[in-house]
Amino acid sequence: MAAAHPFAKAYQAQSILTASPGQLVLLMYDGALRFLAQARAAFALPEDDFTRIQKINTSLVRAQAILAELRANLDFASGGEIATNLDRLYDYHLRRLHEANLRKDESAVAEVEGLVRTLRDGWAEMLLGREVKVA
């Protein structure tokens, strides 16, 4: 199975290079959801597991980086009110994840995960014309 790993990485890199801007946004939502799920999984680790805090932190920081990138690339000139509303929503996501990381609050992570999933599913439906679920 280890031999397939380089091919999987190459395929992933190629799919990113050839993706449309809309598909890239979908990939970013999927990545944020993957890191939020990893953070929630880390909350389930025993409290005496010395890697628990590190895993939670790393996963939340990665999710925040993706959301910050989505926010930074909003086009306010073309996007108008939608871009403004997304900016506010991304700001809320980022603040909640920051609080979740400081307080180790799993419920805040679950809240943001649900909000991001709603955005992701709506984006996928708009982009692809049908409902597409995250694997």
Image: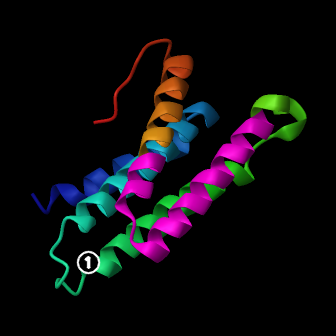
Q: Residue furthest right?
A: 77
Depth check, front residue: 12 or 32? 32
Depth check, front residue: 119 or 19? 119
Q: Is residue 94 above or below residue 79?
A: below
Depth check, front residue: 60 or 110? 110
Residue occupying image coordinates x 60% and y 32%: 22
Residue 47 coordinates in the image, percent (x, y): 20, 79
Report the magenta residues as a range.
Answer: 83-112
Locate residue 87 relative to residue 128 in the image: left or right.
Answer: right
The residue indicated by pointer 1 is 52
Q: Residue furthest left?
A: 1
Residue occupying image coordinates x 54% and y 61%: 64
Please give the count of numbered marks on the rendered protein.
Answer: 1
Q: Is residue 25 above or below residue 7?
A: above
Q: Which corner quadrant holds the N terminus? A: bottom left
Q: Is residue 106 above or below residue 101?
A: above
Q: Is residue 101 above or below residue 21?
A: below
Q: Is residue 109 magenta?
A: yes
Mark 1: amino acid:
Arg
Our reading of the magenta stretch's main secondary structure is helix
Residue occupying image coordinates x 17% and y 83%: 49
**Quarter where residue 57 is shown:** bottom left
Residue 6 coordinates in the image, percent (x, y): 27, 60
**Quarter where residue 19 is shown:** top right
Decide: few, some or many residues near mark 1? Use Cα within 10 Å; few <14, some 14-19, many ≥20: some
Residue 101 coordinates in the image, percent (x, y): 46, 71
Residue 59 coordinates in the image, percent (x, y): 39, 66
The local secondary structure at tag 1 comes to helix
